[in-house]
Image (tube, grey):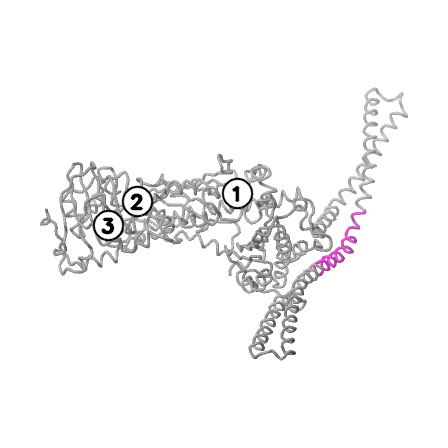
């Protein structure tokens, strides 16, 4: 044994305090140990976590333990002298001396650690610490101690350190065994997925930005960080790369066509997907010359370059020049979690379902700051929005800037190159100085340029839709028709005087030409051959001028008719407005009728059940067999029946005339919470499950009666077909689902879906596949009218169910959403 050499020299209590204050959590502790392996020039670090077992690969001083963490690397290892200083001499840091002298490790790395946190972080993770380490020789050093002893002893020199030499099978490296875990729940159970996401936050998941390989095994399961991240990155809808070389910033971006699906999948399908974006690219490239066609799975790409001294404002001057933080680079991947992705085959194959994909992606979401591949806290960790991406969301922008929950990426700095960007002592941020402040200015500049590009392509897409839909769709509404008439009338007025002048000019030309021709014909003897030839040409032109004159006479009649357009407009416009108003009243009344019909049916059922109970207890009373208990039960039943009637009336009340004109702010989650009792009671008797999924809550400004009628009609339609399905298949479990995802509501059931024969005319009146007498074909038409009156839309999603039929209704409330709620 060689115990006499090893001793501590400070009060144990101070060491415990340092560890508790400087190492805030298990992830930070683990990160410090991984950094130690990096600083030792390791090509890999292997981490094994076992929450219940015992480590048996080496002979330990503390073999009886529960749970362990092993951190192993192939770095240059430690000598006995290094152990004495780097581990047992508190506050000593050879790395600090190396960095101050601007020297590197033998492998050319600038050390990341300089505060001696590695040794202190072990106490955060476990009680027992055992180290096996050797340099390039067979004999190594094995030491062990128990952090619990620091609480028992009065002097640090009295803390027991056990040590021995051992024969190593490895050429060089260090193996750290931490036993008797303090918080095993961090690595187990439901926290495992969260931990995997956290690992990807502290160690760069981007292979090109990671300095060495990291292998992770938890309770016997290998965690493949590279595979998961590569598969996730393939699903990005946009990718941005940027590089600051010390003198200029270069930003490159690529965008997939699916970026433009946005809120209107029908527009995307009809105007982009149909030709794979060819027409849109032609339109876009004319608006922005630096956008090019991309390759592989991306649609378009761009590249921009900005000079550090000329193009970027707001930079601080230090020592007579702009404080340059040093070169850095990074990547930002943008993702979407929209409903259409649930049908993506890659999502199904990799993640099983959309919710798993969303959960995994959002566990890594955020823009991190990595120093040599290791996270600098708190930048991008646990939702920290240091780039203030969330600010753009609160400004009501509809052009989809980068959003905190939808991006995964990093800014990469280097310990040597960016030596002016120093970590704070507690590892929670950068020390504020001119260099760090200018670094943030550059980061915000990159953010703004990316958002500017995003806004531009989205605006251009909207302009493209306006232009292309107008060219290809013709007149769709009465208002468009009147606009077209008024525009025609206005243009006619503009050209009227020009037309009259043209008629006069043609008349004069005909008169003069006719005179010349007659002069030559009447004097053939005195006319030269040249005059005769000219007369023939003029005669030909004269015939053409007379044709033009004839056409102009017809056009004049048309113009005279257009002058009466104002009279037509003045007569028709108020009548059409009355008809539209009558149609809306009809829609509201018809919808009210449908709602009242379902409520009436419930009233009838309640009344029948009440009459049956009254008859039963009336017979008992007649036979003098009734008891106090019977009366109590009957009265309770009457009370519950009255409450049931109140629920029905409460549901019907917002749809009545005196309430139909009132608008109110409605939060969708609260609306369905309040109405769920009615819907569930209504559907339960037919064993139909009713589920509300709250993905992204939002508020709208609308008449409550309208939304009640809209949902009622949708549910009534689904209820009818699900009852039919249940009759055909008694084993089926019918369900209706509503998903709230701002600014959309998605409504669907697990029935057969929409018949292909009517899917293209589904919202027209009197279209239905229900048998005669069972359906009027008005429900969806009425829904469309009610939504249209509130500037909202409903569409049938293009996705098909297992029966090959469309089945999802999507209601777009974007025009009445309360942005600031």
Q: Which residue is mark 2?
A: 418
* Numbered tag placed on residue 93 in the rendering: none
Left or right: 241, with 512 as reference point: left
SS class, disc 3:
strand
Q: Which label sits in the foreground, 3 or 1?
A: 3
Q: CA distance from mark 3 to mark 1?
A: 48 Å
Can you see residue 237?
A: no
The mark closer to the camera, 3 or 2, is 3
Q: Is residue 737 left or right of residue 430?
A: right
Separation (CA) of disc 3 from disc 2: 34 Å
**Residue located farthest toward the left when viewing the structure as drawn:** 4
As helix, strand or loop, the secondary structure at mark 1 comes to helix
Tell me the magenta residue range: 561-585
Question: With respect to residue 264, does 590 lie above or below?
Answer: below
In this view of the protein, which residue sits in the foreground, 536 or 617?
617
Q: Residues within 10 Å of mark 1 (few under 14, many from 20)?
A: many
Q: Position of residue 814 (x, y in %)?
A: 57, 54
Observer able to see residue 147: yes
Residue 323 at x, y percent in the picture:
32, 47
Residue at the spot of label 1 = 258
Q: Nearer the viewer, residue 561 or 276?
A: 276
């Amino acid at each position: 044994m060689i115990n006499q050499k090893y001793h501590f020299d400070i009060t144990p209590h101070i060491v415990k305090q340092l560890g508790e204050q400087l190492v805030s959590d298990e992830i930070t502790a683990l990160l410090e140990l991984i950094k130690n392996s990096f600083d030792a020039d390791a090509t890999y670090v292997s981490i094994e976590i076992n929450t219940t077992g015992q480590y048996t690969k080496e002979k330990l001083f503390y073999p009886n333990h529960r749970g362990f963490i092993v951190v192993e690397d192939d770095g240059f290892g430690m000598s006995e002298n290094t152990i004495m200083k780097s581990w047992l001499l508190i506050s000593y840091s050879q790395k600090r001396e190396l960095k101050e002298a601007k020297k590197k490790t033998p492998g050319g790395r600038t050390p990341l650690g300089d505060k001696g946190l590695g040794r202190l972080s072990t106490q955060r993770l476990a009680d027992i610490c055992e180290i096996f380490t050797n340099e390039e020789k067979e004999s190594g050093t094995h030491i062990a101690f128990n952090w619990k002893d620091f609480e028992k002893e009065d002097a640090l020199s009295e803390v027991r350190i056990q040590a021995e030499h051992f024969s190593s099978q490895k050429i060089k490296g260090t193996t750290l065994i931490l036993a008797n875990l303090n918080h095993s729940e961090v690595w187990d159970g439901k926290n495992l997925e969260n931990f995997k996401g956290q690992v990807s936050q502290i160690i760069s998941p981007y292979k090109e930005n990671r300095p060495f390989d990291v292998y992770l095994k938890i309770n016997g399961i290998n965690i493949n960080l590279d595979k998961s991240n590569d598969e996730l990155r393939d699903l990005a809808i946009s990718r941005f790369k940027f590089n600051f070389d010390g003198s200029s910033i270069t930003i490159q971006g690529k965008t997939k066509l699916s970026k433009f699906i946005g809120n209107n999948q029908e527009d995307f399908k009809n105007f982009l997907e149909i030709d794979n974006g060819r027409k849109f690219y032609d339109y876009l490239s004319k608006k922005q010359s630096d956008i090019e066609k991309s390759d592989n799975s991306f649609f378009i790409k761009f590249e921009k370059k900005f000079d550090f001294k000329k193009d970027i404002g707001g930079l601080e001057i230090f020592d007579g020049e702009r404080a340059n933080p040093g070169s850095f680079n990074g990547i930002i991947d943008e993702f979407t979690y929209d409903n259409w992705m649930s049908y993506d085959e890659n999502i199904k194959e990799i993640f099983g379902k959309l919710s798993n994909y969303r959960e995994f992606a959002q566990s890594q979401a955020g823009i991190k700051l990595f120093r040599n591949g290791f996270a600098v806290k708190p930048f991008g960790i646990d939702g920290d929005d240091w780039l203030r991406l969330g600010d753009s969301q609160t400004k009501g922008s509809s052009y989809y800037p980068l959003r905190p929950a939808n991006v995964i990426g990093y800014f990469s700095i280097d310990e040597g190159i960016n030596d002016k960007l120093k970590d704070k002592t507690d590892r929670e941020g950068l020390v504020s100085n001119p260099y760090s402040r200018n670094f943030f200015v550059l980061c915000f500049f990159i953010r703004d340029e990316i958002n500017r590009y995003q806004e531009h392509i989205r605006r251009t897409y909207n302009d493209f839709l306006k232009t292309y839909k107008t060219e290809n769709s013709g007149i769709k509404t009465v208002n468009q028709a009147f606009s077209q008439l008024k525009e025609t009338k206005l243009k006619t007025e503009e050209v009227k005087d020009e037309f009259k002048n043209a008629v006069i000019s043609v008349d004069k030309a005909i008169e003069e030409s006719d005179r010349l021709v007659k002069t030559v014909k009447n004097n053939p003897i005195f006319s030269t051959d040249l005059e005769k030839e000219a007369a023939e040409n003029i005669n030909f032109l004269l015939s053409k001028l007379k044709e033009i004159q004839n056409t102009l006479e017809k056009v004049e009649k048309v113009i005279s008719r257009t002058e009466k357009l104002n009279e037509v407009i003045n007569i028709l416009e108020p009548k059409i407005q009355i008809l539209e108003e009558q149609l809306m009243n009809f829609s509201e009344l018809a919808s009210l009728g449908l709602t009242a019909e379902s409520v009436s049916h419930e009233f009838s059922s309640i009344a029948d059940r009440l009459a049956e109970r009254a008859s039963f207890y009336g017979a008992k009373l007649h036979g003098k067999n009734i008891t106090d208990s019977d009366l109590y039960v009957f009265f309770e039943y009457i009370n519950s029946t009255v409450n049931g009637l109140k629920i029905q009336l409460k549901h019907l009340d917002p749809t009545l005339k005196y309430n139909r004109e009132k608008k109110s702010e409605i939060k969708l989650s609260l609306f369905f919470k309040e109405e769920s009792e009615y819907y569930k009671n209504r559907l339960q008797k037919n064993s139909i499950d009713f589920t509300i999924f709250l993905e992204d809550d939002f508020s709208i400004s609308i008449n409550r009666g309208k939304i009640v009628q809209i949902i009622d009609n949708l549910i009534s339609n689904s209820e009818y077909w699900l009852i039919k399905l249940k009759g055909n298949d008694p084993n089926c479990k019918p369900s209706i689902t509503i998903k709230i995802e701002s600014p959309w509501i998605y409504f669907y059931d697990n029935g057969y879906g929409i018949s292909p024969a009517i899917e293209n005319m589904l919202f027209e009146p009197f279209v239905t596949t229900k048998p005669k007498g069972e359906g009027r074909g008005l429900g969806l038409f009425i829904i469309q009218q009610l939504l249209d009156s509130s500037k909202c839309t409903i569409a049938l999603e293009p996705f098909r169910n297992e029966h090959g039929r469309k089945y999802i209704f999507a209601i777009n409330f974007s025009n009445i959403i309360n942005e600031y709620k």
